[in-house]
Amino acid sequence: MASQLKVDTLTGVTTAGSIDVTGEGNSTTTNLQQGLAKGWLKFDQDNTTADDSHNVSSVTDVSTGVFNQNHSNNMANANYSTNITSGFYRVIGTNREDGGGTGVPDITSVAYFDVRYNSSGSTYTNIDMTSNTTVIHGDLA
Amino acid sequence: MSSQLNVDTIVDKAGSGGTNVKIANNAVTVSEGGNATTNTVKGLAKAWVHFTTVSSTAVNNNMSFNISSLTDVGTGNTTCNLSNAFTNVSIVAHFNVGDGANGDQSIVQNNGTTSTINLYCFNGSNANHDSSCCAASGFGDLA
């Protein structure tokens, strides 16, 4: 018979912020906290609208092609993993405007990180993308 | 009244693994630093896939999650069809290609649907390009 446990907060016994989960192959465990994405965002910089997000308090439109993603809960340190992808492209002259490989974290701190997009091709001009997606992994404070 | 469960390892009822464990969508997990909590379900990847588009479009070594099928739209263009749909079209999708020797670049384009993600791969000359090592993931809220 299936069982159901109702609980609001999962806390480790040995260490509050460390719970192991048995892996799919049943031979190893993986850390629950470490495996969770600590924030994600879908952001339209052209219209400065956040379509959906998790652990994002606000997005600051810094300048053309550059925005800050500000965290609701800070990270433990600035050395966290960021994954940034553009969801839009168009070809203008010899340049293709997209974020594939050119959406990069310029500045990373515990409270926010900068994202910069520029066009591919020969000019590498900063551009506002209509669809930017970010995911961060690492330790929360 | 809120409740708190202190536990080191989560497994299923039989004790053999975690495949039957269900976590409610409002459950939170204490952070690594112990000073905050984070929503457990929101932090989970809702879909991922490793695939090739060379010769034919196919998942590599059964490495996929929540992917019902892949559609070969054209050269360098693949649609991921999701088994379980998202709640809205704002899927936080990521796509990377691995054989960078060709200067490959990857782009995600949401189709405006909750159940598909459209992916493009280009080479360094901005031409659509098939790649042997494509990896994509999706975050957001499932329906």
Image: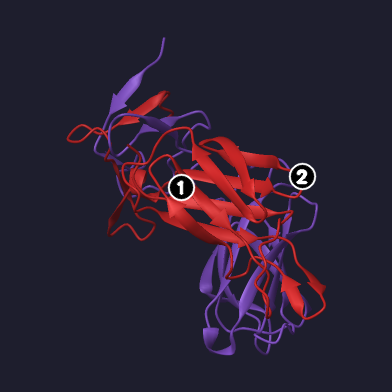
- Residue at the (51%, 36%) spot, across then down: A55
B30, A102: nearer the viewer: A102
Which color has been applied to chain A in this rendered view?
A: red
A131, B54: nearer the viewer: A131
Q: Give residue A84's position: percent from left, percent from top.
A: 56, 59
The crowding category of the residue bearing disc 2, from other C-alpha atoms within 10 Å (few below 14, some 14 to 19, many at least 20), is few
Which color has been applied to chain B in this rendered view?
A: purple
Mark 1 residue type: Ala
Q: Is residue A70 left or right of residue B11?
A: right
Under circle 2, the secondary element is loop
Q: Is residue A74 left or right of residue B138?
A: left
Q: Give residue A56's position: percent from left, percent from top.
A: 54, 37
Does B38 sit above or below residue A104?
Answer: above
Q: Quadrant of residue A86?
A: bottom right
A31, B13: nearer the viewer: A31
- Please name the residue that numbered disc 1 is placed on: A37
Under circle 1, the secondary element is loop
Q: Give residue B86's position: percent from left, percent from top.
A: 68, 45
- Please name the residue that numbered disc 2 is placed on: A47
The residue mark sitting in front, 2 or 1, is 2
Does B76 sit above or below residue B46?
Answer: below
For the residues beneath circles 2 and 1, the answer to whether they share a chain is: yes
Mark 2 residue type: Asn
* Mark 2 in CB contact with mark 1 (< 8 angstroms): no
Q: Is residue A132 left or right of residue B116?
A: left
Does B13 sit above or below residue B50?
Answer: above
Q: Quadrant of residue A124?
A: bottom right
